[in-house]
Amino acid sequence: MSQTAFDLAYDELRAHWPHSTEDCDISTPYGRTRVHVYGPADGTPLLLLHGGSATGLVWFANAPALGRRHRIHAVDLLGDAGRTDRSGGIPLKTAEDLTAWLDTLLDGLGLARTHVCGHSYGAWLAARYALHAPQRVNRLALLDPTQVFAGFRPTYLLRALPHLIHSSQTRAAAFLAWETQGTRPDENWQRLYALAATVPGRKLIAGRRPRVADLRMPVLVLLAEHSRAHRSGKVADRASRKLPQGTVVVLPGATHHSLPLTAPQLLNEHLTAFLS
């Protein structure tokens, strides 16, 4: 079978990861899940959940630093573009399906407990999973989480609407360029993000905001100063009130979709300090 443009872009970005990175396909009742694994075998486990269309490869700029002490497991999310395959598995319908999928994924990886870090849609899923299975989550890091502390800004939704109604590479690229203006994310990743719109069968699940006040593990919230998805100041205030024992930090110069690629050294420093 010939490779699609998305497949070629995926392989190009995969080359950005350290040479010792392993690609694992974990069988679950919902389908075969692709996981990129990096770091010492005896390192503390760290599960990374990406934002919509980003794929698990987006963490390439964070892997070298985080992988010094942690065994990283960067997942291609179920229902999104990537190498996770839903064919023949249980149909993905609800947010509960996603948490059940993560249960079986962690079982397949042999992880009884792990740190969890998610960005955007992945942060929403990470928060839901931490509430679903708190006994399996040591520490929780949320990068510019959407639909967790606040809804989307109307201007963001209006800009996203054409892309959502009739997805295309051109519309996805234009939307990404608008949101990440001034940050210049990696060009290979930008191409992969735009091409994700051409992948058939994508299904991102929507759901209620998680009850973050019920979280009992340590939580770090890293917000993008110039996020166009929501107002970072408003989200920071709400996160501080709902998580009085949590840590809330605004990353200067970052936008929503440019994370986790914007100023990776600063982001890595905050994550490493928190997870350690």
Image (spheres, rainbow, N blue to C red):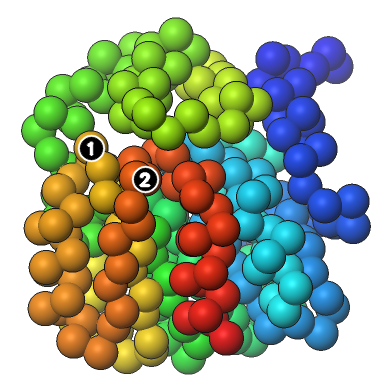
Q: Residue at x 26, y 43 (%)?
A: 227
In this picture, residue 11 sits left or right of residue 162 = right
140 shown above or below 81:
below
Side of 226 where 189 appears, left or right: right
Where residue 182 sits, quadrant-wise, is: top left
Query: Does residue 208 appear left or right of residue 14 in this picture?
Result: left
Which of the marked residues, 2 or 1, is nearer the chain's N terminus?
1
Res 254 label = 2
> Which three-letter amino acid code belongs to the residue tagged 2?
Ala
Relative image position of residue 233 (x, y in whole percent): 14, 57
Looking at the image, which is closer to me, 12 or 209?
Answer: 12
Q: Nearer the viewer, residue 210 or 268?
A: 268
Residue shown at 32% from the left, 29% from the top: 179
Which structural element holds mark 1? loop
Q: Which residue is mark 1?
A: 228
Q: Position of residue 39 (x, y in %)?
A: 79, 69
Q: Are marks 2 and 1 in contact (CB under 8 Å)?
A: no
Q: In x, y percent, where is residue 85?
A: 66, 41
Q: Relative to residue 265, is residue 107 depicted above or below? A: below
How dense is the environment of label 1, judged by Cα within 10 Å: few (below 14), some, or many (20 and up)?
many
Of the pair 201 and 117, the residue shown nearer to us:
117
Q: Amino acid at mark 1?
A: Arg
Q: Is residue 267 left or right of residue 249?
A: right
- Which one is nearer the viewer's eye here, 111 or 185? 185
Question: Quadrant of the image for the N terminus?
Answer: top right
Residue 149 picture location, percent across and down: 18, 62
Point 47% across, 71% down: residue: 270
